[in-house]
C-alpha cells in the first residue's frame, strides 16, 4: 500500500524525516518496503504570470510571452495557444530538469531570445487523466494565484515522499491511512483519535424512506449499511483529492468513484455506489437483499463479463435480480452513469474466507476483494459510510439523505481477557519491566488495562486474543532490538532423537569421499515428467513405474515424484554437454519416493536416500568409475563387496554390474545388493541428447549405513620386508577376473597382502579361447622376515589351485 | 715385495687419474680390492713369505690396501660431485608447463552453508534431524496453528497429492513430529528441501532449502532467541554483521519477527540504487519467533510450564548472500562451470 507522507501528517503529526520515520515504523512491524519520490528528477519549475503575449515576428506558430517569476521577467517563446495575459503558469527556468530527462537551456527560437519554457502537465510526468482540466497540447494554467517564483512542484504533488508499506496478514487494520496514522501515533506516544466526521444531511426525509435491507446470510454478511445521496452531480474531483489518489497509485475517474476509492484508502473499508433506480422497489422502497447465488446463476459484472456463480457466492440483490457480487464487483445493471440522480452507498462487512474463495472461483481479485479477504472490523463500516457522505458534501456532488439503514444483527464488541504482566516480562527476557510500563505500552495501541490486569482489546484488533499477543505488542514498542541477547540456557539431559533421514555421519562420510575422488555435488528437483520412464526404457510393467502423482503440478515436466534417482542428473549431464564442458563428474545424495499403497491418501510415502554418481569425460570409463566406487566403499570401511554382471533397462547390457555385499569368513548369508553401476544405454543417452558415453552408479544409502564402520580397529604396520612375485597365467577366456582373484586369495592366506592385476593380453602368442593375465603378488609376514622357501611354497599352492579350479597354466617366459 | 707394492701403488694412482666416471672407478675397485683383485692377491701371497719379511711386507701391504680404499672412495666422491654438478647444470625443466592435476570435487554451496551451520548447532548441543518431504496437512498446517483460510494452503501455493498429503512447504512440520514424541528440553535443527508452487524464474525455484531450529524448555525467552540469531549471523557473515529484528506475523509463533542483516552488497552504506537492499541498508533473511502456546498445546506440552523459540533459515538465500549469487536456478542446474567455484 502506498501512502504519501502529507496524508499521514494530516492525521498524526510526524516530525521525523521520511527516512527516519520509515526506519522507526518498520521496527514496530509496519515495514516500509521503499520510499518513492515522484518527480524527484524534476527541478527548476517555478510559478510565473503572463505579463504580455506578442506574435513572433518570424514564425507564425510561435508567440513571445513575458513571464514574471517574481525576481525577474523572462522572455519565453511558446507554441501554445491557450494562454492569456494574467494567467498563472508553471515556468521551467534556464537549467531546469523535466520529466523524461528533458533539460531546459536558454537559447533563441527563430532569432528571438527564449529564456526558459512554459510547461504542460506532460512535461511534469502526468497525463490529462491526472489533470482533466489541463488543455490538450497546451500550457497548464493554475486555477488560482500562487506566489510568483515559488517552487511549483508542491502544487503538483511532486515534493512528496510516498511510503510503500508491506502489510502483515494479521493486521488488516493497518491497511489504511488511518490505521498507519494510529500506529504512528503509538510510535510517538501521542494520543490518537480518529478524525471528526461532520455530515450536514441536507436532503429531506430519511434513508429508511428510500431503502430496506434484508440480510439472508448473516455469517457471510455480518453487516450492511445503506446511505442515500440525491441530486447527484457526476464530474471530476478537485486537484487535492486526485493528487492523493494518484500518489497512492489509484487512477482518478470521477467524483463518485474517487470518493469510494479515497475512503477505502483512508479507512480500509471498500464502498460501493449503486444507481438506486437499478434496485427494484417492493412495498414502495428499494429492497436490498443480501443472499447467496443459486448454483449456475449467471450475472454480468461492471466490466461487462458474464460470470457463472456457485451456491457459495454472496450476492447483493433486490427482490428480483442480483445487482452486484458482494465484496468483489458491482453489476453492469446498477452502475453509475452520467444520468444517475440518486445513489445508494453500500458500506458492508463480509466473511473474509468466503470473499477469498469466491474471488478465486471467479478468477477476479479486485481492490475491494483484497481488502475484504484480510478480514475487516464490522464497526469500520459506519465510520467509512459517514466519511463518504462528508466528502459528498465537501465536493458538492450531491445531497445526503439523513440517517442510514444499518443491518447489523450481531454487533462485534471488544474482547477482554486476563493477563499476567510478569509473564509478559519473562517471555521477553525483560525481568525488570514493571507492570506500569507494560500497561503503558498496551494503552498506546488502544488496549485498555485495569488494576485487575484485564485487557480490553478494540474491535479492530481481532489479532489479539491471548497473552502471547500482548507479549508481541509490548515487545514491538519496547523495541525487539533493545531486548538484551542471552545465550541459550543450559539444557540438562540427553535427548533421544528420532531421525527421518540417513544418519548424518554416514552422509557426511559419503559426501567427503565423493568430493575427494573428484566428484561435484549436485542438487536436482525431486519431481519430474512421467515421460522419464520411457526415456529410461523401462518396460510397461516395471515396478519403478509405480509412482506418486502431484495433484497440482507446475506442469507436465514436474508432475510425478521420482522413483529412480537418475533423471535429474542425466538432465544435468546433458546441460553440461550442451555447455561444451569437456567432462562432468556429478554426485547427489537424494531421495526417491514410493507409495506404500495407491492411491496415496493419508499414509506417508517411503523415501529412501540414494547416492548417485553420473559422469562423462575423456578420463572416464567403466573401470575408472568402478575403482571410484570401490575406493568410496572402502572409505566407509565396508569390506567384502562384489561386482557381478547385471541387466538394467537403462544401461549397456554388457557393461552393467550389480554391487553386493558378500558373506565374510564364517558368515552364511546370501549376497545382499547395495547398488548398481554401468555405462548408460546409448539409446538413453540419445533420449537425453548426450552424444558421448555416460556412466552412472547408484548406491542405497540405507544399505551402506547398515554396513558402515565409522572406526575400524587398528592393525600395526609390518616392519618386516615384503616380497613381490609376478605370476603370468594363461586362462580360458570365460573365466572372470573375480574368479581368478578369489582362487589366488584362497591359498594366499594371511601372508598374501596384495594382489594386483597388471596386464591382460590376448593375441598370437596365446592359445585361441584363452587369455594371459599377469598378476603382481605381495607377500609379507607380520612377525618375521619371510624366507624365500615360504614364499615359494605359498606361490606353488596358489598355482595348484588356479590349475585345478580354473584350468590356468603358468605362462612360460 | 716392496718394489711390487710401490709399482702397484703407482699403477693405481695412474688408473685413478684415468677413471672418468663411476663405472671406470668400480672396474678399478674390483681389479684392485675385489675378491680376485691385485691387492687381495698380494695379501694372500704374504703367507708364502718368510716370517721376518712377512711382518714388514704385511704392514706395507695393509697400508697400501687402506690407502687404495680411501683413494678410491675419495675419487668416487669427486666424480659423484662432478657428475651431480654437471647434471644440475644441464638438467632443467620449463616450470611454467601445466601441472598434472589430480582434481578433487566440490561440495554444493548450499551443503557448505548447511555444514557450517550444523557444526555451529552441534557445538551448542543441538540434534540434527531430517524429515519426510511428503507430509500430512496436519503436520504442515493444522498443528502449526495455520488458519483454514490461510493462503499458503491454496493449491496455487502448495503441492498436494491428496486432501491429506502434500509436499512440505517448510521444515516446520518437524517441530510437531519432535514435540509429539519427545519431552522438553528440546534442541533440534532440521535441514532439508522444501517446496512451494512457484514458477521457476530469476528469483524463485519450486524446491529450495531451509533449516528449522526449535528450542523448548522452561524459561526460554525472546532474549535467548536473539542471542542465537546473532550467533548464526556472525558464524556466516563474520563478527561485524549486525541483525535487526522486525515484528512480523506467522501463525505458529507469537511474537514473530523477521530477521534482517546489514546489506552484504553495499555494506549498509545505504547506497542509493543498491539492488540487493533497495537502499534500505538491510536484507531480509528469515522468520522466527516464540513458539505459539497453541502449537505447544497441540503437541501435548504445557505452555504454562514450557516456552520455546523457533526459526526457519532460508539457506538458499543465505548461501546467495554469502557468495553473492543472484540467480537461484544455478543451484539446480549443476553446471560444472558453476560447481567448480565453491
Image (tube, coloured by chain):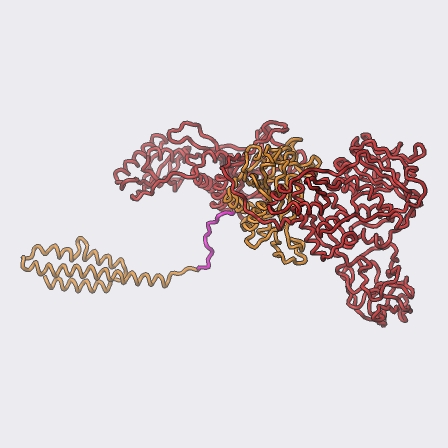
Chain colours: A red, B orange
Measured as percent of width and height from the top left, residue A807 is found at 36, 31
Is A106 positioned to the left or the right of A517 in the image? right
Residue lying at 28% horizontally and 40% vertically, measured from the top left = A783
A209 displayed left or right of A173: right
Rendering quarter of residue B305: top right
Query: In the picture shown, does residue B96 fall above or below A765?
Result: below
Quadrant where the C terminus of chain A lies? top left
Q: Which residues are magenta?
A: B95-106
- Locate residue A27, reporting x and y percent: 67, 50
Main secondary structure along the magenta-highlighted residues: loop
Image position of A214 with respect to B49: above or below:
above
Residue A766 picture location, percent across and down: 38, 38
Q: Position of residue A679 (x, y in %)?
A: 51, 38
Is B100 a magenta residue? yes
Query: In this rendering, does residue A444 appear at all?
Result: yes
- Pick whichever, A241 or A366, lies toward us: A241
Q: How many marks on residues?
A: 0
Left or right relative to A146: residue B319: left
Q: Nearer the viewer, residue A369 or A459?
A: A459
Check residue A225 for magenta coloring: no
**Is residue B215 toward the left or the right of residue A660 in the image?**
right
Q: Quadrant of residue A14?
A: bottom right
Amino acid at each position: 500500500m502506498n501512502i504519501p507522507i502529507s496524508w499521514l501528517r494530516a492525521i498524526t503529526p510526524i516530525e521525523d524525516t521520511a527516512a527516519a520515520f520509515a526506519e522507526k515504523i518498520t521496527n514496530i512491524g509496519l515495514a516500509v518496503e521503499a520510499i518513492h519520490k515522484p518527480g524527484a528528477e524534476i527541478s527548476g519549475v517555478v510559478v510565473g504570470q503572463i505579463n504580455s503575449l506578442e506574435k513572433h515576428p518570424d514564425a507564425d506558430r510561435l508567440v513571445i510571452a513575458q513571464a514574471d517569476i517574481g525576481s525577474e521577467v523572462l522572455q519565453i517563446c511558446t507554441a501554445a495557444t491557450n494562454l492569456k495575459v494574467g494567467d498563472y503558469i508553471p515556468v521551467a527556468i534556464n537549467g531546469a530538469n523535466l520529466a523524461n530527462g528533458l533539460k531546459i537551456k536558454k537559447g533563441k527560437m527563430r532569432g528571438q531570445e527564449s529564456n526558459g519554457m512554459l510547461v504542460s502537465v506532460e512535461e511534469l510526468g502526468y497525463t490529462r487523466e491526472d489533470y482533466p482540466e489541463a488543455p490538450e497540447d497546451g500550457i497548464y494554467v493554475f486555477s488560482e494565484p500562487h506566489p510568483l517564483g515559488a517552487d511549483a512542484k508542491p502544487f503538483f504533488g511532486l515534493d512528496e515522499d510516498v511510503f510503500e508499506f508491506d502489510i502483515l496478514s494479521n493486521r488488516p487494520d493497518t491497511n489504511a491511512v488511518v490505521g498507519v496514522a494510529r500506529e504512528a501515533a503509538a510510535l510517538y506516544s501521542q494520543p490518537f483519535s480518529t478524525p471528526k466526521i461532520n455530515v450536514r444531511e441536507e436532503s429531506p426525509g430519511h434513508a429508511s424512506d428510500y431503502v430496506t435491507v434484508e440480510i439472508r446470510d448473516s455469517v457471510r454478511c455480518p453487516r450492511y449499511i445503506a446511505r442515500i445521496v440525491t441530486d447527484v452531480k457526476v464530474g471530476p474531483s478537485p486537484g487535492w483529492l486526485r493528487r492523493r489518489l494518484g500518489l497512492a497509485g489509484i487512477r482518478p475517474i470521477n467524483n463518485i468513484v474517487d470518493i469510494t476509492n479515497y475512503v477505502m484508502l483512508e479507512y480500509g473499508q471498500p464502498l460501493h455506489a449503486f444507481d438506486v433506480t437499478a434496485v427494484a422497489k417492493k412495498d414502495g422502497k428499494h429492497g436490498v437483499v443480501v443472499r447467496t447465488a443459486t448454483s449456475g446463476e449467471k450475472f454480468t459484472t461492471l466490466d461487462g463479463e458474464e460470470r457463472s456463480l456457485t451456491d457459495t457466492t454472496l450476492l447483493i440483490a433486490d427482490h428480483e435480480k442480483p445487482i452486484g457480487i458482494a465484496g468483489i464487483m458491482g453489476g453492469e445493471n446498477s452502475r453509475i452513469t452520467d444520468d444517475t440522480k440518486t445513489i445508494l452507498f453500500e458500506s458492508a462487512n463480509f466473511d473474509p474466507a468466503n470473499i477469498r474463495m469466491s474471488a478465486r472461483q471467479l478468477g477476479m481479485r479486485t481492490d475491494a476483494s483484497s481488502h475484504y479477504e484480510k478480514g475487516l472490523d464490522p464497526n469500520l463500516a459506519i465510520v467509512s459510510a459517514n466519511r463518504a457522505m462528508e466528502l459528498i458534501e465537501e465536493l458538492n456532488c450531491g445531497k445526503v439523505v439523513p440517517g442510514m439503514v444499518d443491518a447489523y444483527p450481531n454487533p462485534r464488541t471488544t474482547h477482554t481477557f486476563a493477563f499476567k504482566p510478569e509473564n509478559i516480562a519473562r517471555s521477553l527476557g525483560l525481568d525488570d519491566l514493571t507492570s506500569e510500563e507494560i500497561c503503558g505500552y498496551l494503552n498506546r495501541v488502544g488496549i485498555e488495562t485495569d488494576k485487575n490486569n484485564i485487557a480490553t482489546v478494540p474491535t479492530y484488533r481481532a489479532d489479539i486474543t491471548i497473552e502471547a499477543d500482548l507479549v508481541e505488542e509490548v515487545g514491538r514498542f519496547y523495541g525487539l532490538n533493545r531486548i538484551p541477547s542471552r545465550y541459550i540456557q543450559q539444557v540438562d539431559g540427553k535427548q533421544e532423537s528420532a531421525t527421518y533421514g540417513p544418519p548424518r555421519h554416514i552422509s557426511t562420510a559419503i559426501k567427503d569421499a565423493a568430493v575427494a575422488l573428484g566428484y561435484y555435488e549436485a542438487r536436482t528437483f525431486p519431481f519430474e515428467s512421467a515421460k522419464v520412464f520411457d526415456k529410461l526404457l523401462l518396460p510397461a510393467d516395471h515396478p519403478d513405474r509405480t509412482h506418486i502423482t502431484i495433484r497440482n503440478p507446475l506442469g507436465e515436466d514436474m508432475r510425478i515424484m521420482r522413483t529412480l534417482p537418475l533423471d535429474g542428473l542425466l538432465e544435468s549431464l546433458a546441460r553440461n554437454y550442451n555447455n561444451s564442458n569437456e567432462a562432468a563428474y556429478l554426485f547427489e545424495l537424494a531421495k526417491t519416493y514410493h507409495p506404500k499403497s495407491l492411491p496415496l491418501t493419508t499414509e506417508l510415502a517411503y523415501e529412501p536416500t540414494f547416492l548417485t554418481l553420473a559422469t562423462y569425460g575423456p578420463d572416464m570409463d567403466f573401470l575408472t568409475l568402478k575403482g571410484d566406487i570401490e575406493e568410496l566403499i572402502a572409505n566407509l570401511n565396508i569390506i567384502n563387496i562384489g561386482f557381478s554382471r547385471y541387466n538394467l533397462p537403462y544401461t549397456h547390457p554388457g557393461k552393467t554390474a550389480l554391487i553386493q555385499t558378500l558373506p565374510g569368513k564364517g558368515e552364511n548369508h546370501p549376497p545382499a545388493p547395495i547398488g548398481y553401476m554401468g555405462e548408460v544405454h546409448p539409446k538413453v543417452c540419445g533420449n537425453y541428447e548426450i552424444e558421448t558415453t555416460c556412466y552412472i552408479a547408484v548406491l542405497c544409502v540405507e544399505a551402506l549405513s547398515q554396513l558402515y564402520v565409522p572406526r575400524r580397529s587398528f592393525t600395526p604396520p609390518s616392519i618386516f620386508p615384503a616380497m613381490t612375485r609376478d605370476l603370468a597365467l594363461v586362462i580360458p577366456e570365460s573365466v572372470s577376473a573375480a574368479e581368478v582373484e578369489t582362487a589366488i586369495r584362497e591359498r594366499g592366506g594371511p601372508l598374501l597382502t596384495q594382489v594386483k592385476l597388471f596386464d591382460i593380453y590376448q593375441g598370437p602368442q596365446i592359445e585361441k579361447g584363452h587369455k594371459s593375465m599377469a598378476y603382481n603378488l605381495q607377500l609379507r609376514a607380520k612377525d618375521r622376515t619371510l624366507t624365500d622357501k615360504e614364499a615359494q611354497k605359498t606361490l606353488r599352492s596358489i598355482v595348484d589351485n588356479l590349475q585345478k579350479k580354473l584350468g590356468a597354466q603358468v605362462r612360460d617366459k | 715385495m716392496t718394489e711390487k707394492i710401490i709399482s702397484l701403488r703407482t699403477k693405481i694412482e695412474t688408473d685413478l687419474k684415468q677413471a672418468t666416471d663411476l663405472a671406470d672407478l668400480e672396474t678399478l675397485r674390483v681389479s684392485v680390492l675385489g675378491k680376485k683383485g691385485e691387492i687381495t692377491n698380494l695379501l694372500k701371497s704374504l703367507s708364502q713369505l718368510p716370517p721376518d719379511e712377512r711382518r714388514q711386507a704385511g704392514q706395507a701391504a695393509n697400508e697400501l690396501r687402506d690407502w687404495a680404499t680411501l683413494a678410491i672412495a675419495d675419487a668416487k666422491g669427486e666424480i659423484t660431485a662432478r657428475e651431480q654438478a654437471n647434471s644440475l647444470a644441464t638438467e632443467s625443466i620449463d616450470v611454467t608447463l601445466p601441472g598434472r592435476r589430480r582434481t578433487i570435487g566440490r561440495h554444493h554451496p548450499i551443503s557448505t552453508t548447511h555444514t557450517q551451520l550444523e557444526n555451529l548447532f552441534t557445538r551448542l548441543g543441538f540434534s540434527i534431524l531430517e524429515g519426510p518431504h511428503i507430509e500430512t496437512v496436519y503436520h504442515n498446517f493444522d498443528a502449526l496453528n495455520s488458519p483454514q483460510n490461510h493462503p499458503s494452503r491454496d493449491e496455487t501455493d502448495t503441492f498436494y497429492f491428496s486432501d491429506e498429503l502434500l509436499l512440505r512447504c517448510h521444515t516446520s512440520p518437524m517441530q510437531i513430529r519432535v514435540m509429539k514424541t519427545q519431552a522438553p528440553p528440546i534442541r533440534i535443527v532440521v535441514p532439508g528441501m522444501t517446496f512451494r508452487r512457484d514458477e521457476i524464474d530469476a528469483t524463485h525455484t519450486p524446491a529450495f532449502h531451509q533449516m528449522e531450529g526449535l528450542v523448548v524448555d522452561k524459561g526460554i525467552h525472546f532474549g535467548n532467541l536473539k542471542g542465537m540469531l546473532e550467533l548464526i549471523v556472525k558464524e556466516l557473515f563474520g563478527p561485524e554483521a549486525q541483525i535487526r529484528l522486525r515484528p512480523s506475523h506467522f501463525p505458529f509463533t507469537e511474537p514473530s519477527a523477521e530477521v534482517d542483516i546489514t546489506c552484504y552488497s553495499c555494506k549498509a552504506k545505504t547506497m542509493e540504487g543498491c539492488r540487493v537492499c533497495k537502499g534500505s541498508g538491510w536484507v531480509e533473511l528469515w522468520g522466527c519467533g516464540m513458539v505459539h502456546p497453541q502449537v505447544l498445546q497441540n503437541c501435548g506440552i504445557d505452555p504454562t510450564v514450557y516456552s520455546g523459540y523457533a526459526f526457519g533459515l532460508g539457506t538458499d538465500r543465505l548461501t546467495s548472500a554469502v557468495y553473492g549469487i543472484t540467480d537461484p536456478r544455478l543451484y539446480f542446474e549443476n553446471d560444472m562451470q558453476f560447481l567448480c567455484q565453491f
